[in-house]
Image (cartoon, rainbow, N blue to C red):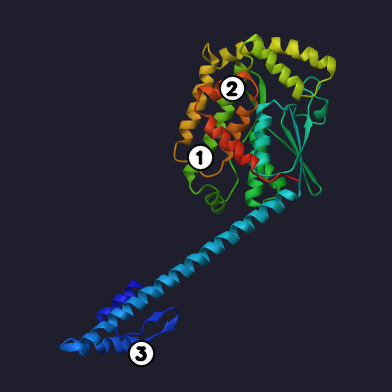
Amino acid sequence: MALAARALWSGRGARAGRLGGRLWPPLLAQSQASFVASAGGRGPAAATRQGRPRLLGAAALALGGALGLYHTARWHLRAQRLRAQRSAVQMSLSSHLQLTLYQYKTCPFCSKVRAFLDFHALPYEVVEVNPVLRTEIKFSSYRKVPILMVQEGDSLKQLNDSSVIISALKTHLVSGQPLEEVVTYYPPMKATNDRGKEVTEFCNKYWLMLDEKEARRMYGGKEARAEEMKWRQWADDWLVHLISPNVYRTPAEALASFDYIVREGKFGAVEGAMAKYLGAAAMYLISKRLKSRHHLRDDVREDLYEAANKWVAAVGKDRPFMGGQKPNLADLVAYGVLRVMEGLEAFDDLMRHSHIQPWYLRVEKAIAQVPPAH
């Protein structure tokens, strides 16, 4: 529109301009004739003729501004409709899934799955597994928790490993691919760990199986995607291993931790009493071995504080979450891992002696504000 205004002012351009979708050749011809006549003219008449292009230029600019506002408003409304459509699609995808989570409530891996399910408003049932007998998961050859059973129509799928559960469900929600197909992207693989024990690992477990358009819509750029994957793995490889040495740091803390575990877990009366005292003693001793295995300091709190501050530094001061304006998968995972210490001395110390509390409370609030799952 600025180019049209300059054409009207200078008098150049014999072709008719199109303003607002309408042809204006009479005005262009008139303004050009007025400019030629005024080149050698003087007095009021010439001044009047000379002022016409200015009026036309101003009119053109005003019309251009109005058109710009119109298209901006139209784009904004269209973006709102698209967001609403995507939300409706996600709700329809999640509504046909029947989820059952087999867990220990105080397990950090189970906690991070719950944080993901709650934030995405995915309804699920919980089966608390007895950590001694584990009869609730006798149907499974995979003997760890969490296990998520997913009923999708006539298909019943078992998802193992917390990171696979999160990646597979998020891929399904974003892409709409059938979950039965999605889980094939995360095949189990037998491996031997550094202690010579055979373990089951899962390929691609931190990777969401999205096409380029879906990945761009979700992340905006490759850097954000790589960052999320890096910190999800950091939570599994490092942050999780700081929990036990800290909550079982002293005999008194170990006893308090097992009192919480027995209270929240699935134990009989006699079994609970035995677990509380024998378990506390055993885990106090095991925590010392864990400290040595992971090369932790004598005061394991220092490693916990350092990890928390490292996370806060990675999030930075310019965004509330690592995901920007809302938590991403890395935010939910880190929050879920730390949440299992709530109510214990280690958690209170962490909040007092590190910089993580503001971020932690923001994630807690973001999850609480999600409408409850039905």
Which one is earlier in the sequence, the residue at label 2 or at label 3? Answer: 3
How many residues crowd around disc 2 within 10 Å: few (fewer than 14), some, or many (20 or more)? Answer: few
Q: Is residue 131 left or right of residue 356?
A: right
Q: Residue 75: percent from the left, percent from the top?
A: 51, 64
The answer to which of 306 and 188 lies nearer the viewer is: 306
The image's mark for residue 334 is none
Q: Quadrant of the N terminus?
A: bottom left
Residue 320: mark:
1
Task: Please tell me which of labels 1 and 3 falls first in the chain.
Answer: 3
Q: Which of 176 and 278 lies nearest the eye of the viewer?
A: 278
Front residue of 235/9: it is: 9
Task: Indicate the position of residue 360 as horizontal and vertical percent values.
Answer: 56, 33
- Tell me, yes or no, if residue 205 can be seen here: no
Q: Is residue 192 above or below residue 181?
A: above
Amino acid marked by disc 2: Asp
Label 2 belongs to which residue? 348
Q: Residue at x 29, y 75 (%)?
A: 6
Up/down of 265 relative to 16, above or below:
above
Q: Is residue 320 above or below residue 7?
A: above
Task: Give the camera-side residue of 371 and 183.
Answer: 371
| Image marks 2 and 1: residues in contact by CB distance under 8 Å | no
